[in-house]
Amino acid sequence: MTDCTELLKTFKIISAVLLILFSVFLLNLKKGNRLSHRFLAVFFLSRASILLTMLFWEYDLVLKIPNLAYLSTPFLFLYAPMLFLYTDSVTRPGFRFSPVKMLHLIPFIVRSLIYENIFSKGSSSECRRTIPVFQVFIFSMSLTRRYTKKLKTEVL
């Protein structure tokens, strides 16, 4: 069992390093569609950040530096938009990155701002901020249920 987990850790390290190196290569590549290369490079960097965060957990680095625990969380929201934008830029001959396409990045931007606000404060303020967010979530879910029931009774 230990050999298998060590093999997986080694595979994650090699994968993260290769993703980072390939991203640097794509960002410095002068030939071809540079915009597509940038989208793919950011896609690979987001994937590498997820792998590195998994390694931080497996090597218990999050116990020493707790902020590493959620390092890749905003990048989870960057994974799908970058894959979409890369695919779109490769398949459409006259692709241009317009401000409308920036809408795909809103979840990443919002999540990054939330985490920047949390990590700029101490860990005790993080706990104090989490409780009201949870309460607002519960309250909004109850309002949504009430509104759904109200709509069902009005339709029938």
Image (cartoon, grey):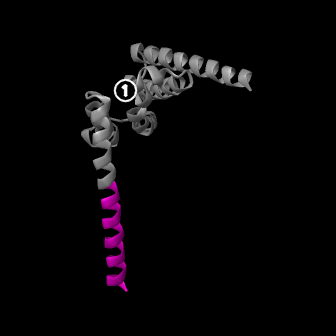
Relative vertical location of residue 35 with respect to residue 76 in this rendering, above or below = above
Please identify the quadrant where the N terminus is shown.
Answer: top right
Q: Quadrant of residue 84?
A: top left
Please name the predominant secondary structure of the magenta segment in the image. helix
Q: Is residue 31 left or right of residue 16?
A: left
Between residues 128 and 86, which one lies in front from this camera angle?
128
Q: What residue is shown with label 1?
A: 35
Q: Secondary structure at mark 1?
A: helix
Residue 155 part of the magenta-drawn span: yes
Judge whether residue 73 can be spotted in this image. yes
Q: Residue 97: x, y in percent?
A: 31, 35
Please identify the quadrant where the C terminus is shown.
Answer: bottom left
- Residue at the (36%, 69%) spot, across then down: 145
Q: Residue furthest bottom?
A: 156
Between residues 155 and 59, which one lies in front from this camera angle?
59
Q: Amino acid at mark 1?
A: Leu
Residue 30 part of the magenta-drawn span: no
Q: Residue 104: x, y in percent?
A: 34, 42
Q: Which residues are magenta?
A: 137-156
Residues packed near mark 1 inside 10 Å, few (<14), some (14 to 19) or many (20 plus): some
- Residue at the (48%, 29%) spot, across then down: 50
Q: Is residue 50 left or right of residue 138?
A: right
Q: Residue furthest front?
A: 124
Q: Residue 8: x, y in percent?
A: 65, 24
Relative vertical location of residue 55 with respect to residue 151 in this rendering, above or below = above
Q: Residue 123: x, y in percent?
A: 32, 30
Judge whether residue 101 can be spotted in this image. no
- Residue at the (55%, 21%) spot, across then down: 59
